[in-house]
Amino acid sequence: MDPPAHAVVVSIDEKSQIQALDRTQPGLPLKPGKCGTMTHDYKRNRTTTLFASLNILDGTVIGRCMGQHRHQEFIRFLNAVERAVPAGKVVHAILDNYETHKHPNVVKWLAEHPRWTFHFTPTSASWLNAAEGFFSAITRRKIRRGVFKSVADLEDAINRHIKAHNKTSEPFQWTATAPAIFAKLAKINEPSE
């Protein structure tokens, strides 16, 4: 909420098991008076995992698709983000409590990169991670209704979406105030009669 001056704050997360689905027929678009259509049958062409780092200040995304979702791939992704962040800047990364983010090799990587600080969101509060909003948008706009003959086609579509997103990116703005959020949480947690 209040990072040090000149720090880079990134929201990092993974969207795993994105399926490259090849539909038997192309879907028909939404038209006046007609719903969009999508066939119920498809061929599965394996999956990919999207690792993403969303810059909180400007909304740009660094993304990498990888075949697996382990600590080794996570460290490779952290190295890509490390190369992209200008020298001399400290990096504050917001992550969820996924075990991969706390693996001993990741902890070792963090110790070897002293400009980095990890901040973990509370359990069951992944919605606090701004990268989740990006994943929601890419799912709605590019993945859900897409037709992908291979994982390479899927990854190409994801990379094109990230490139287009970065051309017009804007920082995410919370529309609710912290007191309003806390009041709503208090109301939810009130004992029922």
Image (tube, grey):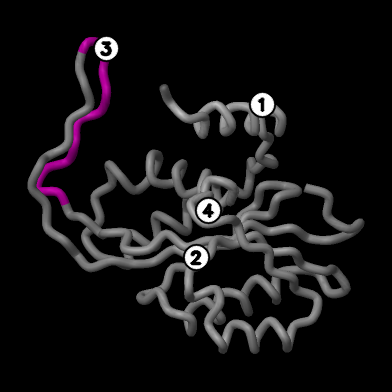
Question: Which residue is under mark 1?
Answer: 180
Please state which amino acid type lies under the numbered disc 1. Ala
Label 2 or label 4, whichever lies nearer to me, is 2
Q: Where is residue 16 in the image (x, y as percent from the top left)?
A: 37, 63
Please state which amino acid type lies under the numbered disc 2. Phe
Dot 1 and dot 4 residues touching (CB under 8 Å): no
Question: Which residue is under mark 2?
Answer: 51
Q: Earlier in the sequence, mark 2 or mark 4?
A: 2
- Magenta stretch, residue numbers: 23-33
On screen, 40 above or below 150?
above
Label 2 SS: strand
Q: Between marks 2 and 1, how big is the CA–CA gap?
A: 32 Å
Dot 2 and dot 4 residues touching (CB under 8 Å): no
Decide whether residue 29 is among the magenta residues.
yes
Q: Nearer the viewer, residue 25 or 179?
A: 179
Q: Between marks 3 and 4, how big is the CA–CA gap?
A: 30 Å
Q: Nearer the viewer, residue 175 or 53?
A: 175
Label 3 SS: loop
For residue 110, which quarter of the picture? bottom right
Image quarter of the C terminus: top left
